[in-house]
Image: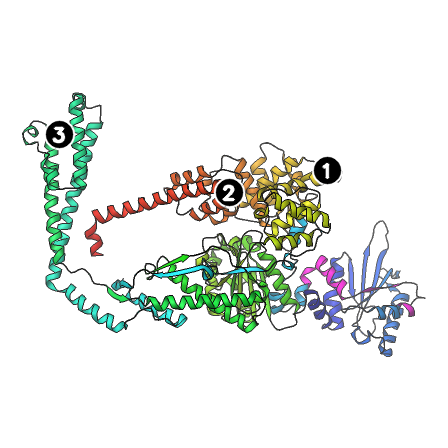
Amino acid sequence: MESLNKQYIKALCELQEDKFTKDILKPLFESMGYERVDFNGGPFERGRDLIAQRRIPPNKEMFVVYVQSKRVSSIQNTKTAAKLSQLIHQLRQCCTGELIDLTGHKLTPNQVYLACPEQISNRLLDEINSQLQTMPLKILFYDGPQIISDIKIYKPDLLDLLTNFEDKLTLNGDLNLNKELLSALKSKNASQFNEYYCDLSFFVGSLDSNLLLHIDIESKDDNLDVKEESWDLFKRECNEVYEKHNINLIKENTSEIEEKFKIKKINYDSKKNQQTRKLCESLDEKITLHSKLINEGIQALTTSLNDQTTLARQNLSSKELSEREDIVAYLKKISFDDKQEIIKKLNFQEIAIKNPFYSETNKLLSWITERKKLKSQLANKKLRFIEHPCYTVKINSQEIIEKIKFLKKQYIQDIELINENKLKLPELKNFLHETQQTLSLLARLDKDDSFLKNNFLLKMIQTDQDRVSISPHEIFLTGHDFAVYGGAGVGKSTTLKAYATLIASEKNNKNIIYIALNKLVDEFKLLMNKSCEQELLKNNLLIRLILLSKGLSSTPENIERAKKVVSDNSTLILDGLDEVYNTIPNIIIAISQFKINHPKTQLIVSSRDCVSYLNEIDFLGITLLPFTKDQLNRFIRGWLKDSNKAEHLIQSIKNRELFEHIKTPLLATITCSLVEKGVNAPSTENEIYSERLRLLTGEYDLHKNIERQKNTGELLRKCAMKIAYFMHTKGLRSLTKDQMFIGLQLSLSDIYTNELLAECLEELINPCNVIILDHITSKYSFGHFRFQEHLASVELKTNRNIDLSDLVNTDWWRGALGLYSQENDISYLIEDTYRKHGSVRKAEFTLKHMINNSPKQRRNGLLKLLQDYIKSDDMDLTFLNEIQDYVYPHLIDRY
C-alpha cells in the first residue's frame, strides 16, 4: 500500500489538465488569499491556464500571477522534443504576455508558475531554466508535493476529491510513532523502543500462557451432579469441549444417564412422595413462624432490660437485673441450640403468675419446645422423602489431565523454537491456534460458573515469567485476531502504529484501518446526546466508529460501502479500548458481533491489562512485557549518544536498585531524556513524572540560563494539575483550549484572575509543552495518557476533599490511583471503602493494583488487611445466605 502523499499525487496525475486547473488550483489559490482567480484554459489561453490577482498594500496595483498547468510525465526525460518545445513556447507567452483588466488597464505578470501534478525532475528543471534564462521573469515551479502540502494548510477539503471511499477508510494519516511523547519531552531523539524490545506472553481472558509452563493439574472428584434445569446447558458444554478440544468430558453415554434420571424422577413425582413433600413444607412453615415469634420475643425482653427510663427497670435490684440478663442469655442460646436438657433447666411457672417478664419467658420456652418437636417431625419425614433428583455423571478426568499435559509439553517445545527463530509462518499460525485453544480449555476449568470448577485443582508449581522472544509484528502477520495488553507505557500504541505503517508501506492488496479510540470519545458523546442516534448506535457500532474516525457520516449508504471495504483481506486496529470502555460499554459486544459478520477481517484491539473486563474479550491476548535488564541497558545505550552518560546511568540504576521503577519503554524514555538534559535519575515512577514536569515548567530553562515564561513553575504545575483532574473526572484525555480554560476557572477563579489563568494555560502550551496540540483533531492533551494520570494523582494527594472510596470502583481511575499509592499509605482507603460500601469486592481489583504499586515494605501488611476485609465480606455473605435458608427454606424448595 502506498504512502498517503503518494496516493494524493497519483490522484492528481489522473486528473485531466483542465480539471486539475479548475477543481484543484483555482480553489487553492482562492484559499491562499487571491481576490480574483480566473480559469483561462482553452485553445486561446496563450500559456495562461490560470490568472490570479490580489492587492498587496500599500500598493494600489494588483499583484498578478500567471499559471501554466501541464502534466509533464510524458516529457520528464526531455526526449520528446515536440512536447517540450510546446511547453517552452507556452511559458514564453506567459512571461511576455499582458492582461487587460475590467477598467481597460494593461496588467503584466509579477510571477509565472509552471504547475504540474507530478514531482518535477531536476533534469526538466535544468532544461526549462536553460532555455528561458533570457526571459524577463524567472519561471517558478509548483509541483505535486508542494501542491499537496499547501492543500493541507489552506484547503484541506480538496483532499476529499483526491481519495475514493476505500482510500478514505484506509488512509491512516500521521502515525508518527512517538510524536506526542518526544514533543512533550522537548526531545528530537528518534530512537524507537521496538529496535531493542520484542518480548511478550499470551492471554485468553485472564489466563496467562505462563500457566502452560508451570501448571500442575489434579482431579479432586470424578463425580458430578447436574441439576435438571442445567442439563441442556451441560450437554452443550460437553459438545463444545469435544468439538474444540476433541475431549469426551463424561464416561457414559448421555442417553444412559438420562434413563437413570428418568427412573429417579418417577419416584420423586409419585403421589406418596409429593404428599410427604407437602407435609415437610407445612412443618417448615410452622418452624419458620415459631422462629419469628421466638426472635421477636427475645428482642422485646432485651429491650425491656436496656431501657432505663421505665419504672419496672428502675425498681430492679442489681441482683434481679443480673438474673434476668442471665435468663435472656440462656434464651438466646437455646433459640439456636434448642436441646431438651437445656430447656428443662428454665422453669418459672409459679413466679410467672405475678411477673410479666417471667410470663413472657415461659411463653418463649414453650415455643422453643414446640419448635424442637416440629424439627424432629420434619427430620423423620425427610428420611422418607425423595429429594428432587440430579443427573449423576462420571467425569473423564484422566483424559482431560493427559490432554492438558500433552498441550503443555507441545507449548514448551514451540516456545523454544520461537525463541530460537526456527518456527516459520505456517507453524506459527498453528501455534497461535493451539495456544488459544489450550488457554480457553484451562479458562473453562477455572471459571467460577463452570460445571467442572470443583472437579479439578489447578496449581502453579513455579511463578517465573515466560518470555516469548518474537516481534509482535510477526505474530500479527499470521492474520489471527489479537488483543494487545500491557501496563501503562509498555508501547501498545507504538507497536500498533508501527505495524499499521509497515503494512501501509508494503505493496500488497491488504487494507489496514487504524483507529485511536480515545480521539472519538467527544464525538461519540455528542451522538449519544441526540436521541435519534442512540438506537442507531446499537447496530453496526464498529462500522459507525470507523466512519466517525474518518470524518464520514453514518448514512445507510456509507455503512454498506464500509462493510464491503472491511469484509475481505482487511485488518482493523482499535487502539485504546480501556480509554473508551466507560463511555461505550457495549463495545465488547460490538466486537464479538463484528467478527460474526466479518469473519475474514483481522481484528486487533489494545487495552491496559489492569481492567475488569478481560474475561469478556474472546481473542488471543498478547501481553507486551517490560524490558529485561539487558534490554533496558541496550535501550539506554541506543538512546544516549554520550556513552559516558549511558554507562553512568546503567551503573546508577544497578547501585540504587531502580530497575523495577524504569523498566517500561515510557519510563526508560523519560529517564534517558532527563539524564540527557543533566538531571540525575529519579527513584520512583511518580518521581520521574514529577521531575519531568519540573523540567518542562522552567527548570530546563534555568539549566540553560534562559527565561521564556512569565509565571512561576509552581503556579504552572498547579494549573496543569487542576486541568488534568478536571479532564479525568470527565473521563476525557483531550479537550479544546476553551474547555480547558473552563476547567481552570472552576478550580482556581476564586484565587486568581481569569487573565492570569488564561496566561498560564497559554504558557503550558508554549513554551512549556506540557499541553500538546493534536493537529488532526485540533484538541489539546497532555501527550501520553500516563502524564494526565500522574497529574490527577497529585491532585488526589493534595486535595483532601476528594473521597477516594468513590473512585476505587471505577476502572478509569485505576492508573491514577496506582500512582497515588506509590507515595501514600492506602490502609485507610481499604477501611473507608468497606465502611462506605459495606464490601471491598467491587474495588478488589483496583485495591490490589494499588497494593502492587505501594512501596515493597508496605505490601505484605496491606495485602493482609485487604484479605481480612475480603474474608469479612465472605462471612457477611455466608451469614445472609444462612439466614435466608433458615427463615425461608419452604420458599426456596418451591422455586
Q: Quadrant of residue 716?
A: top right
Q: Range of the magenta residues?
A: 129-158
Viewer can see residue 789: yes
Instruction: Name the residue carrying label 1.
Output: 702
Q: Amino acid at mark 2?
A: Lys
Q: Amino acid at mark 3?
A: Phe
Q: Return the disc, 3 or 2, that comes first in the chain's sequence.
A: 3
Instruction: Name the residue carrying label 3.
Output: 357
Magenta segment includes 155: yes
Instruction: Between label 3 and label 2, give the one nearer the viewer.
Output: 2
Vertical relation: 611 (above or below) 701: below
Viewer can see residue 780: no
Q: Return the disc, 1 or 3, that comes first in the chain's sequence.
A: 3
Question: Mark 1–mark 3 contact, CB under 8 Å?
Answer: no
**Location of residue 694 in the rendering, given as x and y in whole percent from the top left corner:** 65, 39
Q: Return the disc, 1 or 2, that comes first in the chain's sequence.
A: 1
Q: Report the residue that reaches farthest toward the left.
A: 350
Q: Determine the secondary structure under disc 3.
A: helix
Quadrant, the N terminus: bottom right
Instruction: Name the residue carrying label 2.
Output: 856
